[in-house]
Amino acid sequence: MSTLTIQHPSTLVEPGILTRWNPSIKLISLFVLSVSLLFIWDPIRPAALWVALVIVALTIGKVPFKWLAAAHIPFFAFGLGLFLVNVFSRPEDGVWIGAALAARTLVIGVASILFLTSTAPVALMRSLNQNLKLPASITFAILAGYQLLLGLPREWQTIRAAQLMRQGGATLSRKGKPKLKLKEAGRLVFTVLIVALRRSERIATSLESRGFGLKPRTVYRPIHLRATDILLGLAVCAFAVVFALPWL
């Protein structure tokens, strides 16, 4: 039986220029870009920006084409839904507005993919704590929850193996493959949920006993905020604002 694992997108991409960009500034830039798209009501500019970001993802971002295409599926589906709703609900300008909303969705999607593939969760939380002064009690709690999430697939397999030992083996389908019945799946999900709740309670107790958030803490690996990070963030934010202005 192969081991189930959860991998963050940042582990699938080789480190590059975007990886070295400060995570906090990168997050602020993504937020400004996403907000600026709310003021664009034509599909041409978002479509052009989407093409540019896809090129950046494939070149500078070093995102594999297959992974980028697979990650686009939910954004394509959501954008198609927005397009169809506007086409059928707006008889006059539904196609234009629907295409604009769909293009917005794709831009936000590829920008989010670039952020996820270039930003490790641990580095993001440490940067939010050090650079944006987010309380350590929040950042470390999020990191602890993330580590708990990574361990859930192993817990699933362990509990499933224990259930199969108690019942004398798995039920096989017509093709001879193990079959998970609905009742068995319900018990499995409930057991994994209980294990996750117990572990989260122990993590919360551990964080509280170590006094997270009570006083300033020392930093083992500081994340520096460089001038190049700020300049790049200002450039992206300025571009987003200018890009959202009405064009003649």
Image (cartoon, rainbow, N blue to C red):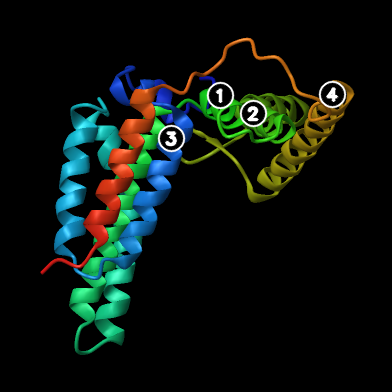
Disc 3, disc 1: CB below 8 Å? no
Residue at which label 4 appears:
206
**Label 1 element class:** helix
Residue at which label 1 appears:
122
At x 63%, y 46%, the residue is 181
Q: CA distance from mark 4 to mark 2?
A: 13 Å
Which of pointers 3 and 4 lies earlier in the amino acid sequence?
A: 3
Q: Residues within 10 Å of mark 1 (few under 14, many from 20)?
A: some
Which of pointers 3 and 2 lies earlier in the amino acid sequence?
A: 3
Picture layout, residue 183 above or below residue 66: below
Which mark identifies residue 143?
2
Mark 3 or 1: in front is 3
Which of pointers 4 and 1 lies earlier in the amino acid sequence?
A: 1
Residue at which label 3 appears:
25
The reply to whether residue 51 is in sight is yes
Q: CA distance from mark 4 to mark 1?
A: 19 Å
